[in-house]
Amino acid sequence: MTKYGFLGLGIMGNGMAANLVKAGYDVTVWNRSPVKCASLVAQGAKQAKTPEAVTASCDITFAMLADPEAAREVCFGPEGALAGIGEGRGYVDMSTVDEETVKAIAISITTAGGRFLESPVSGSKKPAMDGTLVILSAGDESLYKDALPAFEKMGKMSFFLEKTGQAARMKLVVNMIMGSMMTALSEGVALCRKSGLNEFQLLEVLSNGALASPMVKGKMPTMLDGVFPTNFPLKHMQKDMRLAVSLGDRLSQPLPTAAAANELFKAARKAGLSDEDFAAVFKILS
Amino acid sequence: MTKYGFLGLGIMGNGMAANLVKAGYDVTVWNRSPVKCASLVAQGAKQAKTPEAVTASCDITFAMLADPEAAREVCFGPEGALAGIGEGRGYVDMSTVDEETVKAIAISITTAGGRFLESPVSGSKKPAMDGTLVILSAGDESLYKDALPAFEKMGKMSFFLEKTGQAARMKLVVNMIMGSMMTALSEGVALCRKSGLNEFQLLEVLSNGALASPMVKGKMPTMLDGVFPTNFPLKHMQKDMRLAVSLGDRLSQPLPTAAAANELFKAARKAGLSDEDFAAVFKILS
Amino acid sequence: MTKYGFLGLGIMGNGMAANLVKAGYDVTVWNRSPVKCASLVAQGAKQAKTPEAVTASCDITFAMLADPEAAREVCFGPEGALAGIGEGRGYVDMSTVDEETVKAIAISITTAGGRFLESPVSGSKKPAMDGTLVILSAGDESLYKDALPAFEKMGKMSFFLEKTGQAARMKLVVNMIMGSMMTALSEGVALCRKSGLNEFQLLEVLSNGALASPMVKGKMPTMLDGVFPTNFPLKHMQKDMRLAVSLGDRLSQPLPTAAAANELFKAARKAGLSDEDFAAVFKILS
Amino acid sequence: MTKYGFLGLGIMGNGMAANLVKAGYDVTVWNRSPVKCASLVAQGAKQAKTPEAVTASCDITFAMLADPEAAREVCFGPEGALAGIGEGRGYVDMSTVDEETVKAIAISITTAGGRFLESPVSGSKKPAMDGTLVILSAGDESLYKDALPAFEKMGKMSFFLEKTGQAARMKLVVNMIMGSMMTALSEGVALCRKSGLNEFQLLEVLSNGALASPMVKGKMPTMLDGVFPTNFPLKHMQKDMRLAVSLGDRLSQPLPTAAAANELFKAARKAGLSDEDFAAVFKILS
């Protein structure tokens, strides 16, 4: 049986790894703060002391880290994933990172004889737990095929986008649309409230019209409650908006809606909302 | 049996009136350009020569006009709807107009002894034909109740929002969100294309993720085709964006995303896209 | 000697009327709150009890009111300016108002036999006191010529723009540029501060480069002090931004910078800064 | 007598080096395309074949390159400036580059025993020729003092901002304000034109009011002419806007006006205006 490794058990990684364990796979986990491994070990996972120990003992290792810095550190740091990678072993980085980081990791892993796949996901905490993520992959196609059985436990759809870096780009495009749609929704709810209209009627109208989407139905109630449980931290959304706007800059692609939305997320960070859910951008409008 | 009148047989009104006729109601129609009455008459509707003749002979008359000017003209003009309204007859304006226009019509109709309801709708050509509009009403609650059987043929949901003017406001809020989400989507598709990514993969990812909505699934394919059959004319969307941004101005409600989106729709009008579908705003970005 | 009237002794009107009095003219003043007339009377002005009494006794009456509502009230209200206007008398409205208001006043005054000139000004409190305003006029050219000697005491430059309404438009264009440049400056100062750079060096660099303007040299020091003595109230600037953006909407003229600036002024109003100087928009950025 | 070197004789460098030559200094010049050295040699400059030959033979070498890539290439490339720098020799980079580039060059030069100063300038072609630039320096204070006599020939003001990187930041802040003010001006002129107002009257009003600045007086006439002689290429302004907005992103400093202006410059690049003057952003608005 294929041996899987999993590095990073945060908001996303915990649910993803759990779905592999539940499926009966042989899974070895590691997390910077080891206490987060406990529940997975209770479900049947093995625990390793270093990323190196994971990649050295597994056929395919998945990584789900918070940001580019963490992704680099876990790969390149002392006792890192790179040190354990061997001929033919696979390393699948599912973190959302910039293209430079992806490419740096890809080159190092392949130079060391390993196979590399970038596989950022679309979806947040709940889809991660439910195994309904959308998984975007690019890089080594043989590894993509080998990882598919695991992807099927973690997500409901998988795409292969060919060249390394393209999955990261696609992820940015998706998140840029999501961030802009979120500020659009937030402004609508704020205007509804300020106009003396019934917000619950707005929710019903939206939920039954052309704009009905899981995001509208899922996030608008949190705005009405004023409580924003963190599924996707606002600071990460702002980072993605920034990277997307920068990508547009490099390509001379005007993105005025996204640029305005990005400024709102920045204002939200300035207002101390970095660690709340990205829907909390609503707070600075209402 | 209740006698219904219908004024205005454009993109929306044609399908709406047809649903009343198909349901077996006694329907009298009028349109500025009479030729548009032919297909409805063929289905069983009566045709009147003036708005006055419609309101004078029907219990409840629905109006679906293109803009505030048309709504005023049909009501207040010579041989207009106002002239025919009598004690207790109902006038239901389903056009999307500004609050001032709604209130001017409301006061005139009620002063003349009639009952008034504003009932703008959420939805465009296809939902109008399919009878799946979302109908927002405000004004005379007894008229709302009397009109409900007809609303049930034209829409899938109805709401009563109380004070005259509130339905118009709610409609603006909904369309403002829609317009901003459309420019957000357009920028994402343009960035996808400029980045050398596969647009059809983006469509699949969006259609299966948190942003999946009828608008995304219905309009994004028109962007990929480059053909924008007009369901909701861009100039009308820009008008609604403008009215919504102005409402925010009066209420000191910041709306930076909507303001940026409004500027894009203005640029699209400047580029000659006024009569195309509002999704054609994509053209000025790609 | 020409007898001049002056209606409205607020931030602007007080200095303007004083310059007429100082020049030795026969000036009759009125203000809603009569106490503001005292200092001008002490300098030699006559005081009237109503706008009607002013226009009835003067050859040319200048009005400098806070907003469109006040301009209409002083003209059309009981004992208003319109009631006293007689054949050939001149009424010069120097308030910043929208075109509709200007045109309504113009028609009423001319219908009553009077001559009308709209003459909004560019400049705030200090130029009003110093007699260095820039005066934009449109309407009755004979009245423009008759009023020129008075304009020369109140301003340093005068322009005649022909059709009634054009001076109001030109004023809006100028203020729209000013408002956008103010938010541009504010963002620069905020970024300077956040970057750990020396703000006083920035002031010196700006004051000696391509951007050196009276506004930059006059307003940036107030940002560094954090005290914003009101020369031009923020709420009036936001009103002008709104009117200018609306004008752009009607003309399909995209104005994305001004639209973004307008949203900042709205956020400033929401934050309670309406009555501070428009430079106080800086506070919501820093 | 101090021996000065000058690397890069483009739009800016040519005038700056000429001012040193005219002042009677011993100046050795180099340019990638050697033909541009001819006029300076005719005025008395020496010509070198490589950057290395310049730094190896001069006490202080000034560099004025087009962008970060050129600045790195000239310093680090084969026969580059770094190769010729010796103990105590000065290298003054006057190019507008990002902080990373400045710091990379600074470390290499100082490690090689040289002294480093970053000295980006505020001002474009004409001030470069006239010797009226504003020079912002940071880095080695002894070198700043030694370079002051040359700075006095090239500029009208000099500032020392201490830590390496701060001059680059200050330059970005200044250019961000300039870019935003330019789009603000452009929108005003476009609205003036679309409104049927007299653009020359607007120019006079602006030139005599609170917004009168060298930029307004100098650039607005080019908009009215429709000809934009390149003093500061639009693509460079867009680059600076992008770097400034990115700096704001890193510092969580909202910059909505600048972000909107940046999108306009991007749209201008997309429209093929990269090499025109940055005032040509007006073209995409009018």
Image (spheres, coloured by chain):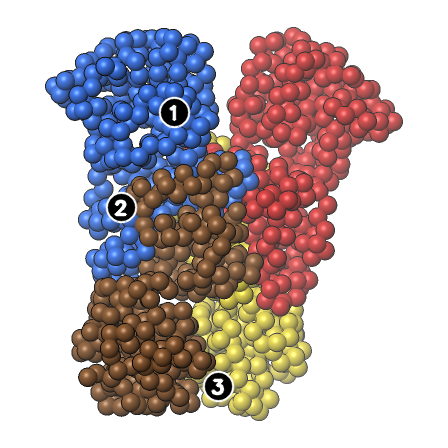
Chain colours: A blue, B brown, C yellow, D red
Label drawn at residue A214: 2
Dot 1: chain letter? A
**Badge 2 local density, few (<14 within 10 Å), some, or many (20+)?**
some
In the rendered view of the protein, which quadrant contains the N terminus of chain B? bottom left
Q: Which residue lies under the disc numbered 3?
A: C82
Across and down, in percent, residue A125 comes to: 24, 34
Look at 69% across and 23% down and name the residue there.
D62
Return the residue found at the far right: D42
- Foreground mark, 3 or 1, reads 1
- Secondary structure state at the residue bearing disc 3: helix
- Secondary structure state at the residue bearing disc 2: helix
Front residue (pair B280, D155): B280
The reply to whether dot 3 and dot 1 touch (C-beta < 8 Å) is: no
Label drawn at residue A83: none
Same chain shared by disc 3 and disc 1? no
Residue D179 horizontal side relative to residue C228, left or right: right
Residue C250 horizontal side relative to residue D52, left or right: left
The reply to whether dot 2 and dot 1 touch (C-beta < 8 Å) is: no
Across and down, in percent, residue A32 comes to: 26, 17
Front residue (pair D57, B108): B108
**Badge 3 local density, few (<14 within 10 Å), some, or many (20+)?**
many
Across and down, in percent, residue A147 comes to: 31, 22
Return the residue found at the far left: A42
Label drawn at residue A118: 1
Residue type at numbered disc 3: Leu
Residue type at numbered disc 2: Pro
The residues tagged by marks 3 and 1 sit, at their Cα atoms, a distance apart of 76 Å
Where on the picture, by quarter, is residue D191? bottom right
Look at 60% across and 89% down and name the residue there.
C88
Dot 3: chain letter? C
